[in-house]
Image (cartoon, grey):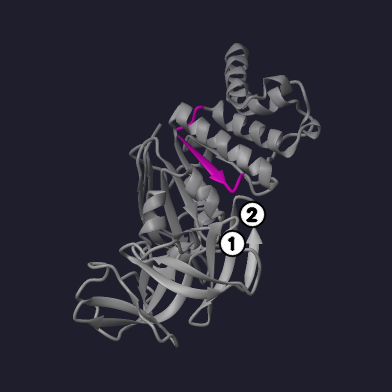
Amino acid sequence: MADVTISRLHKRYGSFHAVRGIDLAIPDGEFTVLVGPSGCGKSTLLRTIAGLEDASEGEIAIGGTVVNDMRPRDRDVAMVFQDYALYPHMRVAQNIGFGLRARKMPKADIEARVGRAAAMLGITALLGRYPRQLSGGQRQRVAIGRAIVRNPQIFLFDEPLSNLDAQLRDEMRSEIKRLHQEIRTTMIYVTHDQIEAMTLADRIVLMRDGVIEQSGPPLDLFERPVSRFVAGFLGSPQMGFVPSTLVRNGSGAAILPKGAGTPLPLPPGRIGPAVPDGVPVLFGIRPEHIARAGDGAPAPGVARIDAEIELVQPTGSRSFATFRLAGVPILAELRAHDVSRPGERITLDLNLDRASLFDAATEKAL
């Protein structure tokens, strides 16, 4: 196992600046997920760590050794790609052990390593089959097994589940998480799927336009986003945003949604005194922080509003209901029978303790 240190890393393709001065330290044994929209530089960063791309500037160290000038095969990393890249004429056991045979490892050692990897991944019964005889999930397990047997310093995963259907993705996420818990090897995983990032990572590195927008434990990014981009990217369904104005009075502060007549009072201490009265803000709230109002007065930190439901999307135990706040469509995650049809008028409680506020000009968190 090894830590990974990236310092002032740049990658350019002609005039295109794909990675822009990344600084990142990944501790030994951590599962780090690089996530972000297409074109943000996450796969380029991963390929540069692997040595498949040369760094334009900066330094990459693995286990304390600078690897910029090392060939990929000398960096002691194992990579799992979106494409399984299995040899169709080889059986599963041969595919898993191919890299070990190329390194002239004794046959008995190869068989032992292949057997251990197959047992870990639950594919022992498949060792005699050819790739064409396997499902997509089984092929991905074989590709992961080929990486495991090498016992590398770090594992690199480049969107390995993108070709699988939803059920298989769920299964393989669990397998990869369990695998990391068993072997505790440093893993760096690239995905554009925020659900994968949240469920797998010890730490998420959210990238945008070649830079790191925010890095930290998944719940830190989810609950304390540093920008509207982070808040909108993480969460499914995503957070709703309402253009508003910060209103201060003698007793505290409130949010006045643009075009609305009634301010929503903020809990004491929710916004610091440095933010002036009348400043334009974006008010953000997640669907799970909106509930149908019960009997009695709202709890402290909760704003109560009347709403007309425009769209109902049942999911079984929950229903997603769309309503408008100051003309902006907002999604509420309600209990299954809290709302029954479009056009229904109900009273909703908004938990402002869990809401997010962003500067309207910079889109940075307040």
Residue marked by disc 1: 320
Q: Nearer the viewer, residue 316 or 14?
A: 316
Query: Is residue 157 a member of the stretch shown in magenta?
Result: yes
Q: Give the Cα distance between marks 1 and 2.
A: 8 Å
**Does the rendering let one see residue 51?**
no
Image: magenta residue range = 151-160
Dot 1, how many residues are within 10 Å of its Cα: few (below 14), some (14-19), or many (20+)?
A: many
| Number of numbered discs overlaid on the protein picture | 2
* CB under 8 Å between discs 1 and 2: yes
Circle 1 SS class: strand
Classify 92 as above or below 275: above
Residue found 42% across the figure and 67% down from its top: 350
Taking depth in this image into account, of 155 and 17 the one nearest to the observer is 155
Of 69 and 153, nearer the camera is: 153
* Vertical arrangement, residue 184 with respect to residue 277, above or below: above
Extreme residue in the front direction: 296
Q: Which residue is mark 2?
A: 315
Kindly tell me whether residue 159 is visible in this rendering.
yes
Name the amino acid, label 1.
Answer: Phe
Q: Position of residue 320 (x, y in %)?
A: 59, 62
Residue 146 inside the magenta-drawn segment: no
